[in-house]
């Protein structure tokens, strides 16, 4: 039979074991949290450094890429070769890819419909409408930083093809949309970081547009950045 003293001793022992286990768990949590914070800081530093390299490369490329004079009166829909390419606007939901059209656009999320309209603006050379998709926050940012590729754009019709839209991130206040495409015979007015080419195999540098809802309830773009490096252009 266990004496009263032994019961008390066992209870105290269990209490000490429990307290030690709690302290160990708290210690492990603190260590893991510290490691995560350090890794996050290192990752941000690497991304910032890579973006700086990207900016330097873009500035160098601007001086070396050669573009033809833009044809402001060309109707790209009369270009038989361009019309033979894949000009569909594809949506990748992570499982399947489908083509968005004017007839079925209502079946897609409003953010996807917005980006579908953006693609049409670019193709049709509707630069005023394109410039208007950006928020005041966006323009204030580029005015402060004077980014040469983010100034208000004037561009004629653009021969976009192999176009794809995807939602790659969502928060309570914003949605990140990746827009991928090729530009046939790029004239440099819309994208001066992609070379001119007669070939269908041209470089892709997907852009991400961060969408927000403005005070009037309209969707606007607050930031855009190169997808590969996930670092802000603005």
Image (tube, grey):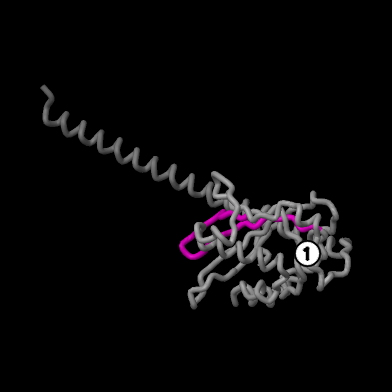
Residue 50 visible to an observer of this rendering: no
Q: Quadrant of the C terminus?
A: bottom right
Q: Indicate whether residue 105 is drawn in magenta.
A: no
Q: Residue 181 appears at what percent x and percent y?
A: 70, 55
Q: Which quadrant is home to the N terminus?
A: top left
Tell me: 107 left or right of 76: left
According to the picture, the residue beneath numbered tag 1 turns out to be: 76
Callout 1 secondary element: helix
Left or right position of 13 against 21: left
Residue 210 is drawn in which quadrant? Answer: bottom right
Residue drawn at 77 percent across, 70 percent down: 156
Which residue does the image show at 59% across and 47% down from the upper left?
97
- Is-magenta flag for residue 181? yes
- Residue 67 image offset from top left, x and y in percent: 87, 64
Q: Which residues are magenta?
A: 165-184
- Tag 1: Cα neighbours inside 10 Å, few (<14), some, or many (≥20)? some
Give the image location of residue 7, x and y in percent.
Answer: 16, 31
Residue 103 visible to an observer of this rendering: yes
Above or below residue 184? Residue 70 is below
State the residue in front, 114 or 26. 114
Q: Position of residue 68 (x, y in %)?
A: 88, 66
């Amino acid at each position: 039979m266990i004496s009263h003293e032994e019961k008390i001793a066992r209870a105290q022992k269990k209490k000490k074991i429990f307290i030690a286990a709690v302290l160990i768990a708290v210690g492990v949590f603190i260590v893991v949290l510290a490691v995560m914070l350090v890794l996050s800081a290192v990752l941000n530093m690497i991304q910032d450094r890579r973006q700086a390299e990207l900016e330097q490369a873009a500035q160098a490329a601007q001086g070396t890429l050669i573009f033809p004079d833009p044809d402001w009166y060309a109707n790209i829909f009369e270009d038989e070769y361009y019309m033979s390419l894949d000009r569909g606007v594809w949506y990748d939901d992570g499982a399947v890819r489908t083509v968005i059209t004017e007839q079925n656009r209502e079946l897609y999320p409003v953010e996807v419909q917005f980006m579908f309209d953006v693609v049409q603006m670019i193709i049709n050379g509707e630069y005023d409408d394109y410039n208007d998709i950006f928020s005041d926050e966006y323009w204030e940012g580029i005015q402060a930083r004077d980014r040469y590729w983010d100034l208000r754009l004037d561009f004629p019709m653009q021969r976009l093809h192999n176009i794809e839209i995807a939602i790659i991130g969502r928060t309570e206040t914003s949605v990140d949309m990746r827009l991928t495409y090729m530009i046939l015979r790029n004239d440099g007015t819309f994208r001066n970081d992609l070379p001119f080419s007669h070939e269908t195999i041209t470089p892709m540098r997907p852009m991400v547009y961060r969408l927000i809802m403005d005070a009037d309830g309209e969707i606007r773009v607050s930031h855009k950045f190169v997808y590969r490096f996930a670092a802000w252009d603005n």
